[in-house]
Amino acid sequence: MTVIGGAETRARKVRWSIIDIVVVVYALIPVLWILSLSLKSKNTLTDGNFVPREWSIQNYIDIFHTNEFLLALVNSIGIALIATAIAVVLGTMAAYAIARLDFPGKQLLVGFSLLVAMFPQVSLVSPLFEIERSLGLFDTWPGLILPYITFALPLAIYTLSAFFREIPWELEKAAKMDGATPAQAFRRVIAPLAAPGVFTTAILVFIFCWNDFLFAISLTSTTRSRTVPAALSFFTGSSQFEEPTGQVAAAAVVITVPIVLFVLFFQRRIVAGLTSGAVKG
Amino acid sequence: MRTAGPPTAPPGRTGWRRRSRRRCTAMLATAAVVAPLLVACGSGPNAGITINVYLPPEEHFQQVIDNCGKQAAGRYSIVYNKLPRDADGQREQMVRRLAANDTGMDVLGLDVTFTAEFAGAGWIEEWTGDRRAEAEKDVLAAPLESAKYQGKLYAATKNTNVQLLWYRDDVVSTPPTTWSDMIAAAERLKAEGKPNQIAFTGAQYEGLVVEFATLVASAGGHILSDDGTKAVLDDGAIRALQTLKDFATAGVTSPSMTNDIEDDARHELENGQSAFEVNWPYVYAAMQADKPDLAKHFTWAPVPGVDPGQPSRVAIGGRNLAVSAFSPHKAEAFDAALCLRNAANQEYSAINDGVPPTISSVYDDPAMTGPYPMKDTIRQELRDAATRPITPAYQNVSTLISTILSPPSAIDPRATADELRTKIQQALDSKGVLP
Amino acid sequence: MTGTTRSVPAAGQAAPIVAQGRTKAVLSEGKRAERRLGLLLCAPAAVVMIAVTGWPIVYSIWLSLQRFDLRFPAKREFVGLQNYLTVLSDGYWWTSVVVTVGITVVSVVIELVVGMTLALIMHRTLVARGLIRTVALIPYGIVTVVAAFSWKYAWTPQTGYLADLVGPDKAVLTERLPALGAIIIAEVWKTTPFMALLLMAGLALVPDDLLRAASMDGAGPWQRFVRIIVPVMKPAILVALLFRTLDAFRVFDNIFVLTGGAQGTGSVSMLTYDNLIKGLNLGIGSTMAVLIFIAVAIIAFLFIKGFGAAAPGSDQGGKR
């Protein structure tokens, strides 16, 4: 559909293959480099070679033996999952209303979420630091979950309302006319149609929460709630005079795994979600 | 791990239980990843008191912790939580938790420059009565001063630290006594094609502030007024700036000098490019381990002075133990701190981790001579040591100094002094912007 | 009217709503129930967003009018606009503003060019289209801090593969301009795919027959691009630029990891963080927060009014 005249010749395919390879190299080099670092043995860590000369999984063994990383991983997973769940539920409610219902203040809500999406997050760090300090939320899970939900909501609302607009809602009416109760109509007809959009939104929101660094580093102070991105920059390593490069790399790879899995399995959905909402958190 | 995990941080019994239950639920959700951790949850804190000690990594300090844990005879147990290695990171972590009134920290291992800030903000307890007497007993004057703020004692000295001039006696016959002598010697060695560079911690960080404070004191100058409220930057300071500039522009340093911290400087001498190195005593043990051959020619002298015939005055480092104002177990924390820094443990740390003791009698122990041969030079420097500026706004002052002095080759002594004076004064009044 | 037909710009929407407000009395029971349900469904999201952004920003305006340093709690006092004077007359602040604007402009321009190229490739490649789109998503999805560490170690002398390329004795991250370059590279790498995806959505709007017709009329590829593709894509381009500009203006993670803001490479976010978290100066930190908020508002205003960028949500960023 995108070819503008001309036959698909072998030469064109070769040309595109080369271009594709350039893109793949561009996208993967930093990822492969951190993977390579994490798999280098202690002796070859600073040899500057792109491919490890001596392979070792010692770094992974090391990080999984420290509470520092394990607790951060638990925090990251727990906080991101809870924030995602809440944001998606609230976002679904709001997006359904925006897509389907007519009520005063709708534009206000749309405008306000846009404002939040553009909000400079660092502007919130000082008031939130002070507010959370006095409320006892500083360095707790809710202390991070709250801002995550807030900044994920515009993303969720935009993506979901775009999806909801595509749903052929007439089917609901048709089902009702065929004698289905509203609950049945929702469960059998609407829910299956809406589920992919909700799922896609959940992935995008999860990626956003998983990614955050500014709040994580400003509103936490201990392993009680520090997530992996923040913990990475605080790794002490085991010995006094050695940079824990290998361990940081290993931890970085571990938190990249879920992202790579998402991208591999849900590429189409993520692309659809991102382009429909045209919003990044 | 270096911060309090669940087994080590009980901030108030009930709060901990609640949190630990919530934590457990979340953990269950991810049980597959963290199965081993679950064991820690159900049991909750044991009946005994746990004293959480926060210190940067010292390889053999766990032994000291264990000694004192045993000595407590069941009254309390001690847990060693590791702080980051760099002073900024240590401070940032402690300060943020103290500002949030965190009760999970009991004994704080403070860099000597933190005392004023922590005491001024009311985050650490004053030492009084018998405990104060014990913490002051037989302690050298300069380190003791670093644990005080406005005449009151706020910490017990654990170890002190002074830089020395390290050099290779196979290429340098007599150690230089002034910076200009040292630069000249390095130029001579360069002409002879021998190892010649002067390794120096010139990166934009706390280490550069230490060097600057040493130079200013050696030139008889002042950065702040004695009461710490006015930025002075007198003639001595200007001559110190001139010396720093001369050194940085003489071509006698490594090209990466403006990026070097302690360990880089150490490596530069170990790998043969430097003949001189201004650094802390830990480099001695490291040299014995890394380069036993070179170690035979690795020797030391006092840091050079600025003016001929005028010995240097070296800015001290070191670590003091303070008790957090938010600790739920202050009495036990004081006792634990006293134990961790007693004479026997200081000697153990000196021999095993290379950190200079603060208790005078430890230097006299014959057992020290073998593993710690530079002790007399250290003590000589300590006799007339200087301090970095003492003010609750130290962090700001230090950040400003290292920013304004970077890179040292760009110093224009008078203008730089003026800039320092204005900016530091703003910081003292908590008015300025932190770079 | 129901939501299904709403692709109308925000301004166009205001009128019907006002009209409905006036006819409140004659609303049917069903309409009223719909309105109630709508408000009810939106309330939780609205409350959370207002509570976590609206209230704190008001609070930070209040904090910015005080001298409030956590290390000198006793000296807390109301100082009016003095903090603003201090910040606005401070060299470090303006340095960070220049750095931020510089990083924003340079990286967004590069991202637009590279992103457009990538979008064209993803849109038109004949081979392995799925693979290309999958791979391009990785920089978007990867945690910024992870990518930043990867770049940092790549530039670290001895350790990294890039450090050797620039020669020994050169520490890229310790000199100002090279360090800024490294920061921009990291930013561009991470965010170009997102830009490309937004642009690709715009590319899908370009009618193929129009291109074919132009081609038959003898228009070369460049002419087709400039005369047809770009004009059709203009809304998508502007939306992508708006979001990336605001996002780039907030740059923090990469700087924190790569240089920590040393050698004059700190952005306004970095400076705010330092004054707040390192300096514990809530007064100055909040002042900077408010100033950044105002700057972002001005940028958004300029884009939306000046360039006519359609606000996403009113136009759905080109999706039809």
Image (cartoon, rainbow, N blue to C red):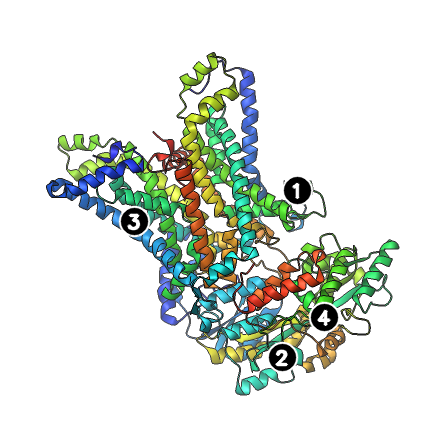
- Quadrant of the rendered image containing residue A202: top left
Whether B412 is drawn above or below A206: the answer is below
**Residue A214: x, y in percent?**
47, 53
Q: Amino acid at mark 1?
A: Asn
The residue to which callout 3 is attached is C45
Q: For mark 4, does the 10 Å Cα neighbourhood hold few (<14), some (14 to 19), or many (20 or more) residues?
A: some
Disc 2 versus disc 1: distance between alpha carbons? 49 Å
Quote the CA–CA distance across marks 1 and 3: 50 Å
Q: Nearest the camera: A162 or A271?
A: A162
Helix or strand or loop: what does disc 2 sit on? helix
What is the distance, in whole Å, between disc 4 and disc 1 at their CAs?
A: 49 Å
Tell me the residue that label 1 is attached to. Answer: A49
Label placed on residue B87? none
Label 4 chain ID? B
Q: Residue B5: image x %, image y %? A: 46, 63
Tag in front: 4 or 1 = 4
Q: Is residue C247 above or below residue C206?
A: below
Chain containing mark 2? B
For the residue marked with disc 2, what is the amino acid? Leu
For badge 3, the amino acid type reads: Ala
- Which of discs 4 and 3 lies nearer the camera? The answer is 4
The chain ID associated with circle 3 is C
> In this orientation, which residue lies closer to the viewer: C104 or C137?
C104
Mark 2 crowd level (few <14, some 14–19, many ≥20, 10 Å Cα) = many
Residue displayed at 53% across by 42% down: C187
Pointer 2: what residue? Answer: B144
Nearest the eye: B36 or A14: A14
Left or right, A262 with respect to B170, comes to: left
Q: Which mark is residue B236?
A: 4
Measuring from the top left, give residue A104's x and y in whole percent: 22, 44
